[in-house]
């Protein structure tokens, strides 16, 4: 495994937090300089997954170069490599008196199989000093021998390996395969949530920038280097929670939209608790308005404002003059839920033929030059077409819940929220009528929508960057 030029994520982040903008740029540059991307992120630390060697070590921890250690996963198939401070947090969390730096190093050395003499030599201290430090380790850990210390280290690495295995499985099954379509500088992460599957999310832009949560549409948008560069330029740390059943074919226990919405909202709150100290702006793209509203309703201290962009406003039983492509699904859901799955099943079949999928999307968004340009880009190369095919094929469950949300969501719930609300609409949006949206915007937010001349209904590529730039420009300093 390649070395990272001494990069340890946690110390670098701590330094960047103390250094201001120059430190922020330095961190971003170091992050982009990583030669070998981690398999996933555990809190703010990278985790690499490497094959288990044929000759297994009898020691619970193995040195992995620099300030990193490795240890086996529970299944014995791979090893996890993490910054040593990740394991230190695990150790400190299970003892009442924190180990000093020297004591912790003794603990690591012996867990790796070093003798006390070897540990003293590496630390350039007397063996008697190391022995005295070892007695402090024994006292704080509640053991009375080196064998007991090694046994306790094995228990602690086992607990940490179990937590990392759950996150690794989450990232590796479906979501992990999507990494090939993401820029190198996008941080893929997963957070633990008690009693539930880990929360998956993407994290991009400067880590000390203004946190903005972006809720994606039913088909995950293409994220490119240009998008990441925009967030860096704007000083925005963009957090994209990945909804359950999006970029994944895993099953959920409940098929009810209300349960799904509760799950999504709690996932979003878990991510915000981890990355933001106070309320943050939320940008709700296309079909995610119901989730944004439910998040602000249940966690009002987490949401500073909501910007609805390219909103599928036929959701919420709003009467409109246009018959857009989802209206028949909404009507069918109210009459016969099985009928409502016809469209999703059609897309499921269409993704096995890129030509059929492209024809389907072009038929839906015909008449808009802006949307046509987005589709030209989306199907402009085999790699791009493969990304969209993967996103659709692995998000059918998420799409189904988004359509169910159009039945259950009510715009009156958004109107009653005390947080500021704003609407953004593309002048070339041929899916929804601007007059209808203007009426809805006035009812919900008390002000007309902001209209972007070069945008249609699809929000990825240049249109997504245009709307996000416009939204961020309205944020107060």
Image: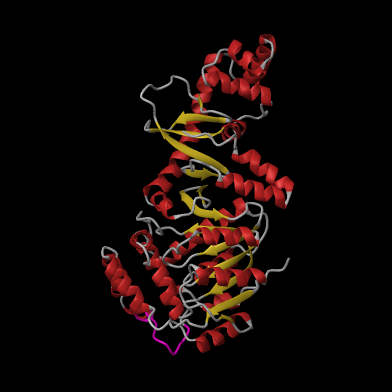
Q: Position of residue 195 (x, y in %)?
A: 47, 48
Instruction: Determine whether 181 is above or below 215 in the image.
Output: above
Q: Foreground residue, 363 or 219?
A: 363
Question: Residue 361 versus residue 396: which sits nearer the camera?
Answer: 361
Residue 81 lies, with reference to residue 351, above or below; the image says: above
> Where residue 384 sits in the image (x, y, percent)?
38, 61
| Residue 109 included in the magenta stretch of the image | no
Queried whether the magenta region covers residue 321, the answer comes back as yes
Instruction: Please tell me in which quadrant of the rendered image residue 408 appears.
Output: bottom left
Query: Between residues 201 and 387, which one lies in front from this camera angle?
Result: 387
Q: Residue furthest front?
A: 381
Q: Determine the residue positioned at 65% across, 30% down.
A: 96
Residue 233, image x and y in percent?
Answer: 63, 60
Give residue 21's position: percent from left, percent from top: 71, 52
Q: Dominant secondary structure of the magenta stretch?
A: loop
On the question of residue 302 being in view, the answer is no
Quadrant where the image shows the C terminus: bottom right
**Point 49% across, 69% down: residue:** 288
Which residues fall within the magenta stretch?
318-328
Residue at 37 percent of width and 51 percent of height: 174
């Amino acid at each position: 495994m390649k070395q990272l030029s001494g990069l340890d994520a946690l110390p670098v982040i701590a330094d960047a937090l103390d250094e201001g903008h120059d430190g922020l740029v330095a961190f971003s540059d170091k992050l982009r300089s990583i030669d070998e991307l981690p398999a996933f992120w555990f809190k703010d630390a990278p985790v690499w997954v490497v094959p288990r060697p044929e000759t297994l070590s009898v020691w619970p921890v193995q040195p992995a170069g620099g300030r990193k250690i490795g240890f086996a996963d529970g299944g014995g198939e791979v090893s996890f490599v993490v910054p040593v401070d990740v394991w230190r947090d695990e150790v400190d969390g299970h003892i009442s008196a924190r180990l000093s730096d020297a004591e912790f190093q003794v603990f690591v050395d012996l867990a790796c199989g070093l003798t006390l003499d070897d540990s003293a030599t590496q630390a350039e201290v007397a063996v008697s000093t190391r022995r005295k430090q070892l007695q402090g380790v024994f006292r704080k850990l509640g053991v009375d021998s080196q064998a007991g210390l090694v046994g306790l280290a094995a228990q602690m690495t086992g607990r940490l390996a179990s937590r990392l295995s759950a996150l690794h499985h989450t990232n590796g099954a479906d979501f992990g395969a999507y990494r090939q379509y993401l820029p190198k500088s996008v941080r893929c992460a997963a957070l633990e949530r008690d009693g539930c599957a880990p929360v998956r999310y993407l994290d991009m832009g400067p880590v000390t920038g203004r946190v903005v949560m972006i809720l994606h549409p039913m088909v995950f948008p293409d994220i490119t280097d240009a998008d990441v560069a925009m967030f860096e330029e704007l000083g925005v740390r963009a957090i994209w929670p990945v909804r359950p059943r999006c970029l994944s074919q895993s099953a959920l226990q409940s098929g009810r939209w209300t349960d799904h919405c509760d799950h999504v909202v709690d996932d979003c709150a878990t991510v915000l608790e981890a990355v933001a100290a106070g309320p943050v702006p939320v940008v709700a793209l296309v079909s995610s308005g119901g989730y944004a509203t439910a998040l602000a309703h249940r966690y009002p201290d987490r949401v500073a404002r909501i910007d609805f962009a390219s909103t599928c406003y036929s959701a919420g039983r709003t009467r409109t003059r246009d018959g857009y492509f989802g209206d028949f699904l909404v009507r069918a859901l109210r009459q016969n839920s099985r009928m409502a799955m016809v469209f999703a099943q059609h897309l499921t079949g269409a993704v096995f033929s890129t030509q059929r999928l492209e024809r389907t999307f072009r038929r839906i968004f015909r008449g808009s030059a802006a949307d046509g340009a987005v589709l030209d880009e989306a199907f402009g190369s085999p790699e791009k077409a493969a990304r969209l095919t993967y996103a659709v094929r692995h998000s059918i469950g998420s799409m189904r819940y988004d359509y169910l949300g159009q039945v259950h969501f009510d715009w009156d719930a958004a109107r009653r929220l005390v947080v500021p609300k704003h609407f953004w609409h593309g002048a070339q949006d041929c899916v929804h009528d601007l007059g209808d949206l203007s009426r809805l915007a006035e009812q919900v937010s008390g002000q007309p929508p902001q209209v972007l001349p070069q945008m249609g209904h699809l929000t990825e590529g240049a249109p997504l960057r245009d709307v996000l730039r416009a939204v961020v420009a309205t944020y107060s300093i």
